[in-house]
Image (tube, rainbow, N blue to C red):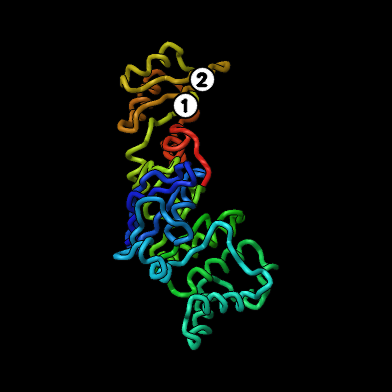
Amino acid sequence: MIRIDNLTKYYGSFLALDSINFQVENGEILGFLGPNGAGKTTTMQIMTSFLAPSEGNIYVDDLNVIDDSYEIREHLGYLPEHNPLYEDMTVFDFLKFVAKVREIEPASIKRRIDEVVEICGLQKVVHREIGVLSKGYKQRVGLGQAIIHDPRILILDEPTSGLDPNQIAEIRELIKTLGKKKTVLISSHILQEIQATADRMVIINEGKIAADGTLDELMAKFRGDTILEMELKDADTTKLEDIPTINDKIKVVDLKESEDQFNLVLEYPNTIDPREDIFEYAVNNKWKILEMSRSKTSLEDVFRKLTVEQGGSHEN
């Protein structure tokens, strides 16, 4: 288990992380969400010992990044946001180089490279120079170097940044496959990416933890009102404005008339569902319902509520 304990980071007088706390369970894929500059990369760089904390600590089981940095790094695989590759090397030579840096037994290096090439789908490019590869294949090589020593924890910082939709889908599936056997912390500001891969989410904003939970938990806690849009024909304006009498929690937030058609927008809490009553009310008044649709709170709504509405973000 990874435990972030009162983690604080200053850059000079600037407070980048403000005593944050959360944990990642063994075998979990945790999505680390936040706007650009919220503190995601700083947290990951401390976790991987690229930076030292100003206060607090990060624990991996009984180890911590202040006293046991080298031992922790043996258990971690790290893919930074800016994928560091030697582009004049072939994929095979690069993985061999990283394997030696990771002190893999010489007799096991070839077998491990073959395993990583298979896992990451690098068979077609294993003997090509990295510099000529597509961005998608370069990300696969980056993932390959992160897992070459078979770590039990993967730290992935914006792993799909700059990829096209097909490449994103491929990397997403690869991460989900790796997550079946490893603990994964994946950072992103792309909400769909986290929603598609993560078991749980932590949202950080301005160096503080804004939310922590599964998607269902976050939606239940931060959900707003439901919006119901209706397109009606042959409706009575007076009766339209009278709809809140069905339930005093219903609000008419917009009403537009065009010839004999009406566009009506209603708002009501997610705790109730008055659609059947509204439909029956329309039928009783002999309105023709041309269209009716509703929109509920999305992960994007939750994210904006916790970040944009609470203020801007800073760098790092």
Left or right of 196, for residue 132? right
Q: Is residue 181 visible?
A: no
Q: Name which residue type carries label 1.
A: Met
**Residue 96 percent coordinates (x, y):** 56, 79
Q: Residue at x 39, y 48 (%)?
A: 8
**Residue 287 percent coordinates (x, y):** 44, 21
**Residue 244 percent coordinates (x, y):** 35, 18
Q: Residue at x 35, y 46 (%)?
A: 212
Left or right of 147, for residue 202? left
- The kind of secondary structure element at disc 2 is strand
In this view, 5 is above or below 298:
below
> Could you say which disc has been placed on residue 262 in the image?
2
In this view, 235 is above or below 111:
above
Q: Residue at x 34, y 51 (%)?
A: 22
**Residue 181 percent coordinates (x, y):** 39, 69
Pick the front one: 67 or 216: 67
Pick the front one: 13 or 115: 13
Pick the front one: 17 or 211: 17
Tag count: 2
> Which residue in the structure is indicated by mark 1?
230
